[in-house]
Amino acid sequence: MSSWGVVGVIARREVLVKLRDKAFLGTTVFLLLLVTAATVIPVLLQQRTPELRVAAQGEAAVAASRLAADLGGAAGEEDADDGSEVRVELALLGRGGLPAAEVEVVAVDEQTDVARMVRGGDVDAAVVGESLEELRLLGGEGVPVEIELLVSAASGRLQVAAAAEEQGLDAADVAALTDPAPPTVVLLDALPSGSVPPELLVLAFAFLFYLSVLTFGMSIAQSVVEEKQSRVVELLVAAVPVRALLAGKVIGNTAMAVGQVAVIVGGGLVGAALAGQGPVVEQLLAASGWFVLFFVLGFVMLAGLWAVGGSLAARVEDLQSTTVVMQVLVILPFFAAIFAMDPGPTQRLLSYVPVTAPLLMPARVVLGNAEPWEPVVAALVVLGTAVALVLLAARLYEGSVLHTSGRLRVGQAWRHR
Amino acid sequence: MAQELTLAGVTRTFGDRTALDDVGFTVRPGRMTGFIGANGAGKTTAMRIVMGVLAPDSGEVTFDGRPLTLEVRRTFGYMPEERGLYPRMRVAEQLVHLGRVHGLGAQAARRRTHELLERLGLADRADDALQSLSLGNQQRVQVAAALVHDPVLLVLDEPFSGLDPIAVDAMAEHLRERSAAGVPVLFSSHQLELVERLCDDVVLLHQGRVLAAGEAGELRRRRAGRRLRLVVDPFPDERAPAAEGAPTGLAAFLEQVPGVSLHAHDGRTVVVDLAEDADDQALLAQAQAHGAVRELTPVVPTLAEIFREAVR
């Protein structure tokens, strides 16, 4: 049997063990649900147009409220028509910067105690006033922002229209005044944008990478120390080159880690597709290419060292201390990725440092501040480091995996062959 | 198939302690070789060197006249001193995995696993996690792990330790079967009676050196030296004892034979050691004068006796 055949056999066992591991299955299902919920729920929330009731008392108040209701309805329709072109920040707002809302106007007479209606929750707010100049907006603890914006706009338009009419302008002039055409925005250095803020995407991927490397890294270390502690390793090294053993473990666990991430991201995509968010799916797919590549490279780069963390230990109890360096190597890049979210020299530098590159370089691609050649260079840097670290890991692993009587230091593992 | 395992001049040190010092012996095909020695004598180290788990400082291990490589070792069956299999893995999956690690194809590994579990009476536990089995059954799985790939050589470190007498017999049966099929078997044990019963050849290791190696019966005869057991029925008229406390009549006559010293006596049976130049025929003549000689045999020491004497 070729040594790759042996590597395959070893890797297969790692996969098999993982597939039987209830904790692994549980975590995967949990993350899958979490991600699906995280994609579907905001989409559902975002789609809903608020339904609001407003009490109107007085002639001007009724007129302003009715116009506000019309404006809110019109904004909602425009929003639905070309939602994909609306900037994320303005997703709530329709053309002309007005929020979409279904406003129901309840006209009440002078005797009605509107304050009581508002306090009682009968209506969300009340508009009171006989003249446009003296309109008052009554709210309980606050006035819903949609109502405030819509009523202000309606009141403004009615006043402009009244003033224009006094000046003798015709209906077309009045329309031009009250509903001016907004400028078309043209961005010279457009950042990629989508239905999901890119920062959120970066965070989500960073978190997945962090979680995946930490749990799978620990599981590689455990798998190694289990073989040491149970002495199976002595049977194995009599039949298999130590390096093949290491390679099988790294490959098997990498496959499972990538598979888990694929399932989770796939769950997110399916969720988004089911929620009818085509643009989100496209955005995720476009972003995931570099993330997946860097994920694999970053994972392999550290996987060998996790195995060394396991082989330096003699018992499972030693793992905490032998893998502490590894944990730091995973946690630091995670926080670096969060704190270096804003473009700048720090982010540029860290996106080339091997341990932070797997998070920050794809982040820069998604955030749109990386030249096309930059991820290629960073990928090569990570690949080179991965090769070096795997070779280092192989030597340390060879030097320590048969040493079963106590925990070792790195220096001892290096010297002992 | 004249495939034999040979160690020649194997030396290994750990720090300033010499675990093996110029060790050489041969494990022959179709024969069971017992590896005996006190704790710390170097048996496990020697076996680990054979299996490539440790490297010798100097010396050579060959199989079928060729130096050992991983490819060759993969065809060996090994039971390490410290038992070890994956505790949480299912029994059958574990054996299939180990079979494949040792170079079997998936089909063959499954077939062999099935056969072995059937033979070891573990077929109904095939899908249980190893750790849920009793220690004795775990030991049986360990045996299966050493046999699953139909090894051409067996190296077993203390295969009998921790087994009940019935399991010992079953294990012995297995080993004899493999051996009869032409497989050289090397196993270590502290149960010397068992080694005596099972082994064709013996290697006695003491403080890293081979004290004795070779065919077990020959070894015992060679170690027998000139100790003889004599059974005599004394003639009635010569029965009268001398003074109180003096040797009885049976023993007293021995003093008349030059170069004979009394080792033990029990009524009509005496055990004597002959000096290099002493004549056993003179002893016989004396004995016949003393009574009717029923038996005169060289005393062959047991392995246990040789062992104790050697390591003293």
Image: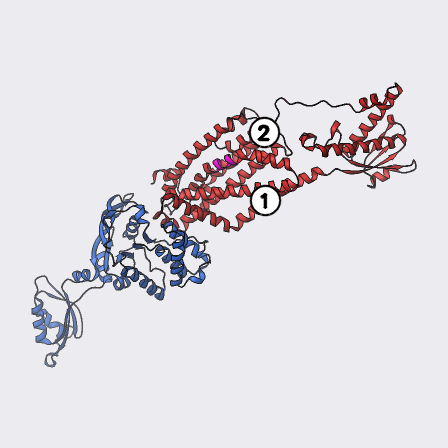
Residue holding disc 2: A367
The dot on residue B180 is none
Res A356 seen here: no
**Residue A93: x percent and y percent?**
73, 31
Q: Is residue A170 above or below residue B142?
A: above
**Residue B152: x percent and y percent?**
29, 54
Chain B shown in which color?
blue
Instruction: Point out the image quarter for the N terminus of chain B.
Output: bottom left
Identify the residue at horizontal 29%, vertical 62% (top origin).
B176
Amino acid type, mark 1: Leu
**Scheme by which the image is coloured:** by chain
Q: Is residue A22 left or right of residue B72?
A: right
**Residue B93: x percent and y percent?**
43, 54
Q: Is residue B106 left or right of residue A363?
A: left
Residue holding disc 1: A32
* Residue at mark 1 to residue at mark 2: CA–CA distance: 25 Å
Q: Magenta residues: mostly which secondary structure?
A: helix
**Residue B63: x percent and y percent?**
25, 50
Q: Assess whether residue A296 is covered by the magenta stretch.
A: yes
Local SS, label 2: helix
Amino acid type, mark 2: Leu
Local SS, label 1: helix
